[in-house]
Image (cartoon, rainbow, N blue to C red):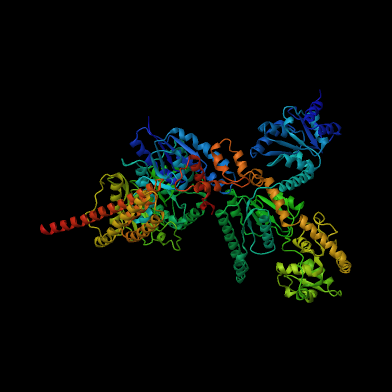
Amino acid sequence: MTVLKQNVGILRQLNQVFAAQILQAPGGALSIQPAKSGMPTALFNSRYLHSAYDPVREAERWAEERIKDCQAGETLVVLGVGLLYHVQALREMLPHDQIMMVVVPDLSEFADCVSVRSLEGWGERVMWLTGSMTDMAVQVTQKAKRVRILSYEPAATVHHDTYEHFRLQLRDHLAQQLSGALHIMVVGPIYGGSLPIARYVVNALEGLGHRVSWVDHSPHYAGYKNLDTIRDHRLRLTVQQRMSETLAVITLAHVAEDPPDLVLALSQAPLTMAVLEQMRRKKVLTAMWFVENFRHLTYWQQMVSGYDFWFVMQQAACLDAFRKAGAKQVSYLPLAAEPDIHQPMTFTQEERHEFGADVSFLGAGYRNRRQILPSLVGQGWTFKLWGNEWDNPGPLAPVLQRGGARIDTPTTVKIFNATSVNINLHSYTGDGFDPEGDGVNPRTFELASCGAFQVVDARTLLPALFDESMMAVINSPDQLLPTVKTYLHDPARRVAMAGLSRKHVLEAHTYGHRMKTFLGAVGMASPDRLGAILQGDRQAESLVARSEQSPELIPMLKQFPQGDRVELVDVAKSIRKKGPEARLNREELLILMMDEYRQEKRDFL
Amino acid sequence: MNKQVLIINITRMGDLIQMVPLLSRLEEEWPGVGIDLIVDKEFAHVASLIPGIRQVLMFDFQLLMDESRVRARDVVALYQDLAHWVQPLLQVGYDRVVNLTFNRRSAFLVKYFGCSDERGMSTALDGSFVVKNPWMKYFVDFHVYRPLNRFNIVDLLALGGSGTGSFHPLRLDVPQDMQKWAQTYVRQAGTADEWIAIQVGASDPMKAWRPEYFGQMMARLSQQRPVGFVLIGTKKEEADVREAIRCYRQAGGLGIICEAVGQTTVPQLVALLELCQLMVTNDTGPMHMAVGVNTPVLNVSVGHVNFWETGPFGPGHWVVQPDIICGPCGFDKVCPHHACKDQILPQEVAELCLHLLDARPFPSFSSKVRVYEGGVNEDQLGTFMIRAGTEEPRIAWYAEYWRQYWYESFTCFPSRVPFPPTVPPDFPECEQVWRRLSPQLDQLCIHADTVLDMCRQRPIPVDLLKARQHQLSVDTLTMQQAARPSLAFGPLAMAFFRDTFSLEAATLSGMAEENVRAYHAFRTRGAENYTRLEEMCSQNTRRALYARAIG
């Protein structure tokens, strides 16, 4: 019997359809050659997927490294097929009852593999996933709670985009299943655009049932701003730096007082590398949502190794840049809107007079805006320009509102709602539209959330977020004027498009959605810790189930209601409640001892 | 069968070395005793240098702390790790568990063993904290009357963990290969007639003499004698060491410098210290190491350090202490001036070094410092004798008085240390305090007895009991406020306080009984103490009359 026939027999036992598909697959994706050791090795597009010398040994080393992180109860999902040496090695090292799945993105590649490599003795204990990425993600989440993804890079690279898609699908499916609550500490900036986002993030996480501690540094703004009285530039920078360092230490003190499961910092949060390194030493997990254009603000390069998880609002080049700089985990997480804040509203006569206009732009005076927006002046419609950093506005002077003062969020909502055509030009320090423009700004989501109509400049990531039935998208500055004219005279269309955009925000682009995605991603990247908590593994019944080896714990754990997250502190509290007449047993003494260790704080700072 | 003792000493390098005489004392008490030591994984290498330990039982307590705080692992996993490590130790059946880690975490571990002879911090049946053994109780709060303490921690650990006995010095084993390593290491830096170890840094900057003074002292010394310096310390202390070297060069230092900062393992460091003829140091772990390998130590004692507690133990070692009103300051003190450090002059320390190297007679010192020489007293305990400077007479008198009092009270043996035939420096004041205190104590004892009676009644008259207890607390506070400022009665009030906060009974009436014992003990001790002071006075008066009578 040939190897292929034998393997198909094995696969048939597991999945008849899959076995039939393998027999029909054309094959020829891989080029098979003998390695120096005599075992077959494979090439794809002239690149070796396994060692040309000893693929078995290479696979064993790979598996030995990976297995160190694997925990009991996790389902391991392997990305990368090749000749499956790595899968065999890992399967043989794992306990018999640990579930292992392999994502098979290309049947031809798999057919090539099973023509030369026998699955006998180990392939029966692997779940082979096929079908669409969504189907595979569903298969995983139906069978597994705690998932650890292991990527065999030489073979996984061949299907990089497919596997990325699979990861995203899996993340979103896992996010739907989250039942456990985390304690998340959100660290905001002293001031700036990410400050309101920090507030929205706090609300969203609380709305999802998590405990949130917000380290709000905005009360320090007055002191920080007061440093402007130091006229010497270098002195001022030095003092500002010292102040930021102090705020970082203050954050660390908050972490020490009430350690969270995860620290989530927003861009510009005053956290220094020294403090981040200290957090890592103390096993605090950290994430950063970098809601900035990575090309314009580059301080992330110095901070990249400081955070465990990075989330960015740009894709492709941005993700590559972060990975090359050393980010361990980096994921795309676009911005969103907070519909409780950015919502449709009605106006008094005075408000309509103050905030209403045919055309408005709200934003800072970047170079491209100074260049493009004057074309909207003197066109026979009312045009209002709102926002700060518009010194020397030139032809825009007559339309600049409030003397170029900073506009707060409630006013922003009024302006968006009271304007017929809102202009949304992404900032750029050059002329015209940013040729590399990819990430979508918060204003896009906020206008949509208000049910306000907008004309927005094209961004490569925009079509995946909104379609052109929801907003008018222009590809060049010279399209601005005709587009405004067209829509200004078609109120019914404007209203319909804006309505669709709001509906779509509510369905897919709130901070609540983002935080679900965020938690799915961190859970997937940390299956034994955040993932486990999010999947409910710290709930009383799960802990009881894991107490087989220490049955003395079970009575203590059974006191807690099912579904409650139970931690050391809770068990210790329940022991202390017994009062002065109690006779503590040995396990209770150990719990109290551990709880005393838990309460130590001094070594954090 | 030989006795078996478990010592819990988890957290610090210095503490581990300071317990060495306890091991010898236990061997003296129970020949052939098997001693096991529980220590944090980080300090296991230090424990390996300590002679007399049967088994070093290490656990990664730091990891437990880190993982439990951030909930990196669930309660089941954390528990199973700890239980898996500790459960087998129950089989040993220890005859005594000595807890030298004075914190609440270790108290639970002590109780876990369920040993009938516990020393140090443990817990009562309900998990509340208790301290077992009078010496260990003294250890917990002697800092309240800190200037009056004359017991080195080394002795407190040995007395508390075992009992009285002969004097045993600190002692460390230096592996032979490390001795060879140390010789090669210093030879690479150059040759010197004598090597002086210098520890510029300290775990807390408060207790470190200024680096520039170390540099100037070294320069002065090197100009008088062909010595070389071995600079030791941790990586964190590198900046201070650099500063010391800079000042050394600037002040015209001539000797060779062998830089070993952050470059040695603990066994290597111990070997380097053994090779040196002298060590000049702040109060640090390596200071105790040097003492453990018989290298004379000159300890610069500044900031919140009190050398009576943690100074170099035994004969052959010296201490220089600034004579400053605010020193030694409190542990939680944030000091804006560190003026104590400026009172110790580098040239004077250099001169003392020369004396210790047998090169010079004992030098003279400015009035701003006190110089002490370490020794052993007649009770076989470590002590210090003042060689330069002066002590505040009232403090010095009471310190010696209480040393003797506690020794006799805790051991039930008379102290063999001769007590100076002088009267209490403030006897009239003592009399006044006692006249106020005595009736208060009588009344408190009656109240405490009443509370006990109520606790024994069935049903307990809860409301009445609460009211009585409240009144008792208020009156106790008033009494303590009267007693505490007095050097003659304050330490007894502290001992009373310690007794009432270390109740082991598990029932209400049991606790009330312990309370009653504490009140009565305070009254008895107070009366005895007053009589003793009075007798000292009258003896002295008789002696004076006799002296006058015989002309």
Q: From the viewer's perspective, is A56 left or right of B390?
A: right
Label total for image? 0
In the picture as drawn, the residue positioned furthest to the left comes out as: B550
Q: From the viewer's perspective, is A567 left or right of A527?
A: left
- For residue B90, say whether it is visible: yes
Q: From the viewer's perspective, is B201 left or right of A140?
A: left
Quarter occupied by residue A131 = top right
Quadrant including the N terminus of chain A: top right
Quadrant including the C terminus of chain A: bottom right
Percent coordinates x, y for residue B192 in the rendering: 42, 46
A38 vs A191, nearest the viewer: A191
B377 vs A199, nearest the viewer: A199
Percent coordinates x, y for residue B459 in the rendering: 40, 49
- For residue A439, say whether it is visible: no
Residue, x 73% and y 41% (percent of image)? Answer: A142
Quarter occupied by residue A93 = top right
Percent coordinates x, y for residue B548 in the rendering: 12, 59
In the picture as drawn, the residue positioned furthest to the front comes out as: B459
Percent coordinates x, y for residue A382 in the rendering: 83, 74
* A135 vs B547: above or below: above
Q: From the viewer's perspective, is A94 left or right of A106?
A: left
* B332 vs A538: above or below: below
Residue, x 71% and y 72% (percent of image)? Answer: A405
